[in-house]
Each structure stands twice: as structure tokens, then as C-alpha cells.
Amino acid sequence: MDTTPPPQLPLESKRVLCGVMGLLLSGLGIHRFILGDVTGGILRIVISLVTCGAGSLIGFIEGILYLAKSDEEFIRVYQVGKKGWF
């Protein structure tokens, strides 16, 4: 009986797409929806509405952080690890 795990398919990095969306549409939380974090995306929208747009700074900072990471680190932290904030 073979007990080796099936081979893992490599994940494609969404770093650039999420980073650019974080920079351009930070208040809409699009970058979080792309990562599959619906709750985080809705939360970004609510924060932006409550703070009259000032809360979109959170998404802008996240976009910068995404683009500053390597593809491997981004996949490990945000796509596999599902880190929610920064």
C-alpha cells in the first residue's frame, strides 16, 4: 500500500493583482475578495464608508506590502496562511 501523499499543484501567485487592486481600489476591498476573504473585503468596504474614505488607507498599505513581498512569501502568508490584516 502506497502512503505517499498526492503531489501538490503549485499555486499561482496573486501578489501583483492583489497589490495593484489594493493601491487603486483599496476602499472597495477588491484585493481581499481576490484572495477569497469575503469577510475581509466587506469589512474594508464598511470601514471606508464609516470613515468617509479615510479607512481605505488600510487597503492602500496592504497593496504596498503585497508588492514588497516575494511571490513565495506572498503565497505562504496570504494564499496558504490566509493572513487577514497587513
Image (cartoon, rainbow, N blue to C red):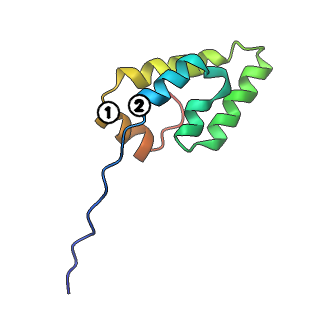
Q: Is residue 52 left or right of residue 59?
A: right
Say left or right for 3 vs 10: left
Q: Are marks 2 and 1 in contact (CB under 8 Å)?
A: yes
On the rendered image, what quadrant is the N terminus found in?
A: bottom left
Q: Position of residue 67 (x, y in %)?
A: 40, 22
In the image, residue 43 sits, relative to residue 47, either above or below, namely: below
Q: For the residues marked 2 and 1, what is the alpha-carbon distance in whole angstroms?
A: 6 Å
Residue 45 figure quarter: top right
Question: Callout 2 environment at 10 Å: few (<14), some (14 to 19), or many (20+)?
Answer: many
Question: Taking 58 as reference, is 77 above or below it?
Answer: below
Label 2 vs 1, first from the N-terminus: 2
What numbered label is drawn on residue 33? Answer: none
Residue drawn at (36%, 43%) of the image: 12
**Element assignment for label 2:** helix
SS category of the residue bearing label 1: helix
Residue drawn at x 79%, y 21% is 50
Number of numbered callouts drawn? 2
Residue at the bottom extreme, as displayed? 1
Side of 85 relative to 7 (left or right)? right
Mark 1, residue position:
71
Q: Residues within 10 Å of mark 1 (few under 14, many from 20)?
A: some
Image position of 81 with respect to 44: above or below: below
Mark 1: amino acid: Asp
* Residue beneath the point at 20% across and 81% down: 2
Pointer 2 residue? 15
| Residue 49 on image: x %, y % | 78, 21
Which corner quadrant of the image does residue 8 belong to? bottom left
Q: Amino acid at mark 2?
A: Arg
Please report the residue visible at 27 percent of the width from the left and 68 percent of the height from the top.
6
